[in-house]
Structures are given as C-alpha cells and as structure tokens.
Image (tube, grey):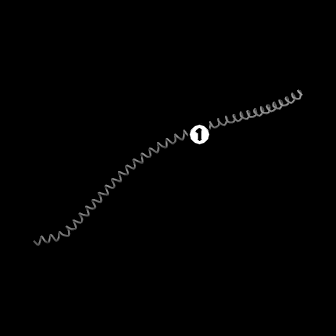
Amino acid sequence: MQLSETNVEAERTRGRLAAQVKESGATEQRIAQAESESEQLGARLEQLDGEIAVHQSSVTALEEQIAEARARLLGINQQRDALQARLREREAAIEAGRQAILRLLGEASHLRNQWRRWRNTWPASSARRRVR
C-alpha cells in the first residue's frame, strides 16, 4: 500500500512538475514577447523623437516667418496711418477751400445784385438830379 501511495504521490508530483514546466515555458514566452515589444517600442520612440525634432525645427522656422511678417505689417500699418493723416489734412484743406469758394460766390452774387440795383436806379436818380 505504501508503494501504491508513493506511486500516486510521485504521479501527482510529476503532474505538478509538468504543469510548472508548462507554466514556466509560457512565462518565458511572454517574457520574450514583452522584450520584443519593448524593442519595437524603443525603435518607435526613436522614430517619434526624430519626427519631433523635425517638427520643432519647422515650428522655429514658422515662428521666425511670423515675426518677420508682423514686422512688415507693422511698417505697412504705420505707412497707412501716415497716409490717412495726410489724406485727412488734404480733405480739411479741400473743405476749407470749398467753404471759401462758397463764401466768395455768395459775396460775388451779393455784389452783382447791388451793382444791378445801382445800375437800374442810377439813371433814374441821375435824371432826378438833372431835374432839380
């Protein structure tokens, strides 16, 4: 009996040992797979680092272009403001000239009317003076 119990116990131990060997093999396979994935991720990380460097240089170049464009736009805005100021001055001068012309036209019209009245009344007053 003792022999059969020992055989049964040995068989159980062999079964457990086989299960542990099988589990150890699966663990080793998972470790190898994890190492492979780690290497792939390392390569991908290096590739992404390279892409980041390229994008950073592009961003730097774009920031420089933006700064240059801003400087040009600032100059253009200053020129536009100066031109608008000159335009406002010219418009004011034109308006002042227009007002002066209208005033002079009014005065000329008034003088013409006075001259016509005087011309129409002068012969009559001249005749009255002769009569006196």
What residue occupies the far top of the structure in this picture? 2
Q: How many marks?
A: 1
Of residues 131 and 73, which is closer to you in this image? 73
Give the vertical position of 77 relative to 3 (above or below): below
Indicate left or right for 38 with 85 as reference: right
Residue, x 75% and y 33% (percent of image)? 27
- Residue 49 placement: quadrant: top right
Indicate left or right for 120 with 17 as reference: left
Give the vertical position of 54 relative to 13 (above or below): below
What residue occupies the far bottom of the structure in this picture? 131
| Amino acid type at image mark 1 | His
Indicate left or right for 80 with 19 as reference: left
Indicate left or right for 64 with 116 as reference: right
Q: Residues within 10 Å of mark 1 (few under 14, many from 20)?
A: few
Residue 97 in percent (x, y) is at 31, 56
What residue occupies the far front of the structure in this picture? 1
Disc 1, SS: helix
Residue 32 in percent (x, y) is at 74, 33
Residue, x 48% and y 43% (percent of image)? 70
Which residue position holds label 1? 55
For the C terminus, give its image quadrant.
bottom left
- Residue 1 placement: quadrant: top right
Of residues 92 and 27, which is closer to you in this image? 27
Give the vertical position of 16 relative to 78 (above or below): above
Residue 108 in percent (x, y) is at 26, 62
- Residue 12 placement: quadrant: top right
Residue 14 in percent (x, y) is at 84, 30
